[in-house]
Amino acid sequence: MTERLIRLFRIITLVQGKPGIKAKELAERCETTERTIYRDLELLGAIMPIQSQGHGKGYAFFGDFSLYPLDFTDQEALAFSVLPSLKDQIASLLPPGFDTACEKVLAAHRKEAAGKRRLVRDVADMIQMGTPAYREDGNRYLYDIIEAILDCRTIRAVYHTQSRNEATLRDIDPYCLVPRDHRYYLIGYCHNVREVRTFRVSRFRQVDKLDRSFDRNGFDIREYMKHTWSIERGDALIRFKVRFSPEVARYVKEEEMFVKPDMRTEGDGSLIFEVTVNHDREFLGWLAQYGPDAEILEPAGYRKTMRERLARWLALYGE
């Protein structure tokens, strides 16, 4: 599906850039068959004004329809920028105005790229990043990380691991940012351990974007975070069954969750809540806010866990 989507955008650019282009040339430029091109054109014709100009006359958009195609990659922009330096070799083949046309196209590209950078920086500045209490406010690398995600560029980062109180140098392919509890986490492929990991953004000490691109290889954030209550992922699948009292049932129903629970309202107004998670700590912390209005029914072992926790609280606060 992704391959076809890329080809469809390529066809749109080619038709707009060369009205009257024929299916055979489209197939050659897109490295596919004419039969495939005809199917793609049929699909595009259902959503935009693209049509055949007649037998042997190729395809074009009709009316004033057009798209803004200057979404150059760095490599494409570099390739285009060297054209003026080649003009002496092909001067006799070039029409008047070639130099100024190149200048205007590159100027438009640079303006668009600068606008995107400003937008990304503005978004990063608007996001309030917390600073861990154990250290003073330092550099914030959210803008650099967002830019690397958009450019599909590997980052080299110094990352502080709180549990071991050490900083390590890591090469990371940044896939996406995830907001949780007023913090941001980066999910990406860590080359050091050769697997996808989750990184807390406020723990980065240094971030440099490398001149090395990466492919997400079909990474699906929804599948990766499946059964994850908040951000902490585990290996086990734990099925919790909880009864919420009628007093809090409606509030639980309005909670915005990252996993989908099964909920059933009882005759007395209480709520039976069932959910499968792969780690218990964050889920138990969420339940704690409801106090005695939330009773764990299953697994039975967690009823003992809650009794032991309450016993420690009583020992701490008891007279």
Image: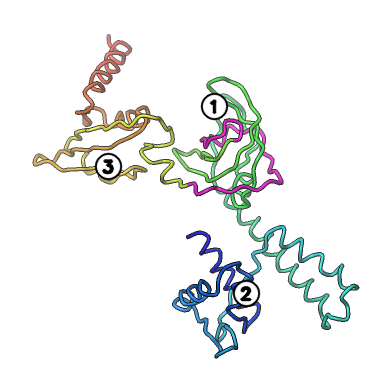
Is 289 on the left-hand or right-hand side of 13?
left
Q: Residues within 10 Å of mark 2 (few under 14, many from 20)?
A: many
As for residue 194 lying within the magenta part, the answer is yes
Image location (x, y in percent) of residue 87: 87, 73
Among numbered discs 1 and 3, the one appearing first in the sequence = 1
Question: For the point 58% across and 43% down, which residue is it?
Answer: 174
Name the amino acid, label 3.
Answer: Pro
Of the numbered discs in the image, which one, if any, rests on residue 14?
2
View extreme (right): residue: 88
Q: Quadrant of residue 181?
A: top left
Image location (x, y in percent) of residue 42: 46, 77
The secondary element bearing badge 1 is classed as loop
Residue receiving disc 3: 261
Among numbered discs 1 and 2, the one appearing first in the sequence = 2
Name the amino acid, label 1.
Answer: Ala
Q: Is residue 18 above or below residue 164?
A: below
Q: Is residue 86 above or below residue 304?
A: below
Of the numbered discs in the image, which one, if any, rests on residue 133?
1
View extreme (bottom): residue: 54
User: Whole-Å distance between the Cαs marked 3 and 2?
Assistant: 47 Å
Of the numbered discs in the image, which one, if any, rests on residue 184?
none
Q: Residues within 10 Å of mark 3 (few under 14, many from 20)?
A: some
Question: For the point 21% across and 40% down, which residue is it?
Answer: 249
The secondary element bearing badge 2 is classed as helix
Image location (x, y in percent) of residue 145: 61, 44
Q: Which residues are magenta?
A: 191-219
Q: Nearer the viewer, residue 298 or 6?
A: 6
Image location (x, y in percent) of residue 119: 61, 56
